[in-house]
Image (cartoon, helix red, strand yellow):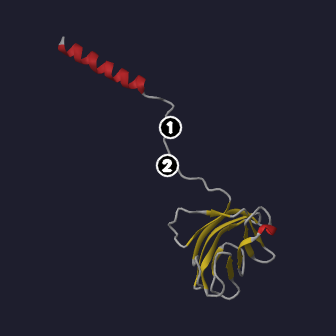
């Protein structure tokens, strides 16, 4: 009789566990933040939680330049102008001849160093990262940012 009760108890427990499992459960994936299109940057501290966003941005292949504007049009004020020797996926040294970096927060004068890494340019949209440092005196001396799927014109 003891074996019969143990068997019934074991079967009841297995039945309970089987019924309580949700068959619709799927494997959970980490909550990765989605990357949205646009131009964002941080000033002075790459670990800062203050992220700034441009109103609009674009790559102009005619000038081999990346622009970021305060508003939704080019007439709304240029925040960034990055002139490069090319706009193909590559790493561009800002100190190299033919490359230039303008950020409205940098002071006038001073040497600018850093790099721009274009990771994608399919002719319609471009993506990449940048970091720039200036020796000019001012409240902003370092800038770190990304541009994701910005229009190529």
Q: Position of residue 94 (x, y in %)?
A: 63, 82
Q: Residue at x 57, y 85 (%)?
A: 135
Looking at the image, residue 19 sits to the left or right of residue 149; the answer is left
Considering the numbered disc 1 on the image, is that residue within a helix, a strand or a loop? loop
Q: CA distance from mark 1 to mark 2?
A: 13 Å
Q: Residue at x 31, y 19 (%)?
A: 11
Considering the numbered disc 2 on the image, is that residue within a helix, a strand or a loop? loop
- Pick the residue in front: 110 or 126: 110
Q: Residue at x 48, y 41 (%)?
A: 27
Quarter of the rendering containing residue 130? bottom right
Residue occupied by mark 1? 26
Q: Residue at x 64, y 75 (%)?
A: 105
- Pick the residue in front: 141 or 91: 141
In this view, 22 is above or below 80: above
- Could one spot residue 153 in this view of the protein? no
In this view, the residue farthest toward the left is: 2
- Pick the residue in front: 16 or 105: 105
Mark 1–mark 2 contact, CB under 8 Å?
no
Looking at the image, residue 125 sits to the left or right of residue 132; the answer is right
Give the mark toward the camera: 1 or 2.
Answer: 2
Residue occupied by mark 2? 30
Q: Position of residue 142 (x, y in %)?
A: 57, 76
Mark 1, Cα crowd under 10 Å, few <14 / some 14-19 / many 20+, is: few
- Pick the residue in front: 89 or 47: 47
């Amino acid at each position: 009789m003891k074996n019969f009760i143990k068997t019934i108890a074991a079967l009841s427990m297995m039945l309970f566990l089987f019924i309580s499992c949700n068959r619709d459960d799927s494997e959970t994936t980490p909550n990765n933040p989605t990357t949205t299109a646009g131009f964002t940057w941080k000033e002075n501290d790459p670990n800062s939680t203050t992220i700034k966003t441009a109103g609009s941005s674009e790559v102009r292949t005619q000038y081999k330049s990346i622009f970021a504007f305060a508003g939704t049009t080019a007439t709304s004020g240029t925040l960034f102008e990055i002139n490069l020797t090319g706009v193909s996926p590559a790493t561009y040294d800002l100190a190299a001849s033919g490359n230039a970096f303008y950020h409205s927060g940098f002071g006038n004068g001073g040497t600018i160093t850093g790099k721009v890494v274009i990771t994608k340019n399919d002719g319609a949209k471009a993506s990449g990262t940048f970091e720039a440092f200036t020796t000019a005196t001012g409240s902003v001396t370092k800038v770190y940012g990304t541009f994701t799927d910005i229009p190529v014109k």
